[in-house]
Image (spheres, grey):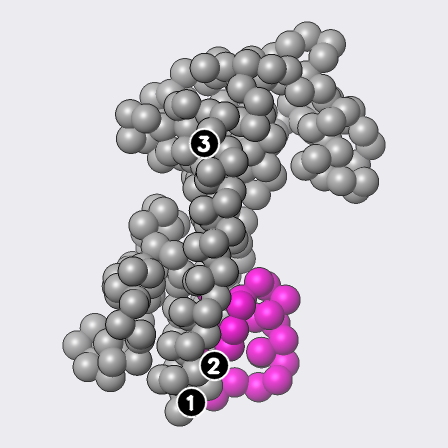
Amino acid sequence: MFKIGLLDNYNKNDLDTKQTFDTRCEIYHLSKETVINQLSMIDGLVMHYRENAEKSELYEQVVIIRNVSVIPIWVVSEVMSSRERLTFLKLGVLVIIKKGIFDEELSLSLVNALKIVDHRRTITNTRILSQSKNIEIIDSNCSIRFKEGQIVHLTRLEFQLILELAKEPNKAVSYEELTTLIWSDSVPKGDIYRLANLVFNVRKKLREENIDPSIIKTIRSRGYMLTE
């Protein structure tokens, strides 16, 4: 069963809304004020707008979500220009659907995409969890879950850092290797200051969830290590 989040500008009592989705989709009505904290409970997110006044707000919402998650996003609109469609696609929206061909197209698009996501997530989790005893990697929304239940939401770069360290816990990963894996060729290899800032931000988020930040250990003159 796939869990689909609908932002709260949907009519929750609209029977057509429920009938739109495949029987393999479980629907959750989410608040736009708290959607970031709810990303870990869903597999995909559907947004909808009817008026131009909602458009700018929706752009902003997509940007905020994309900074912390790669979760599939669909946008549904009654009227949308080609320029608006292009903007949404550039922001990372998976599919833009016009109201009217909404029902069947959205339902099929959701299920097809989520099958792929589910397959990739299974492969990723199997690979990473076999190495890390204490941390569960949640690839769909760039978060990590600890054995005690705490969930920490990360930016994509922060998530990539944890992902690389979790592949081989208790083994140091060099500055050069980490910068290459995280930024490819966009920053100089071994950029210690940029990497240190990334580690600082992750440790701060760990403290906020009462998790010992020293699980990310600095190995002087070498790199960083995830301890277990």
Q: Amino acid at mark 1?
A: Ile
Residue lying at the far left of the rendered structure: 13
Q: Which residue is mark 3?
A: 129
The residue closer to the viewer here, 129 or 19, is: 129
2 and 1 marks in contact (CB < 8 Å):
yes
Q: Position of residue 205 (x, y in %)?
A: 44, 29
The residue depicted at 40 percent of the width and 91 percent of the height is: 100
Judge from the rendering whether residue 16 lies leftward or rightward of residue 219; answer left or right: left
Q: Is residue 58 magenta?
A: no
Give the spatial CA distance, label 2 vs label 3. 36 Å
Residue lying at the far top of the rendered structure: 220
**Span shown in magenta:** 73-96
Q: Position of residue 181 (x, y in %)?
A: 70, 35
Q: Position of residue 110 (x, y in %)?
A: 42, 70
Q: Is residue 90 magenta?
A: yes
The residue closer to the viewer here, 78 or 109, is: 109
Give the spatial CA distance, label 2 vs label 1. 7 Å
Up-down: is 29 above or below 184?
Answer: below
Q: Which residue is mark 1?
A: 101
Secondary structure of residue under mark 3 = helix
Q: Which residue is mark 2?
A: 97
- Residue 65 visible in the shown view: no
Secondary structure of residue under mark 2 = strand
Query: Which numbered disc flags the more N-terminal residue, 3 or 1?
Result: 1
The residue closer to the viewer here, 123 or 193, is: 123
Q: Amino acid at mark 3?
A: Leu
Instruction: Look at the image and tell me in which quarter the N terminus lies.
Output: bottom left
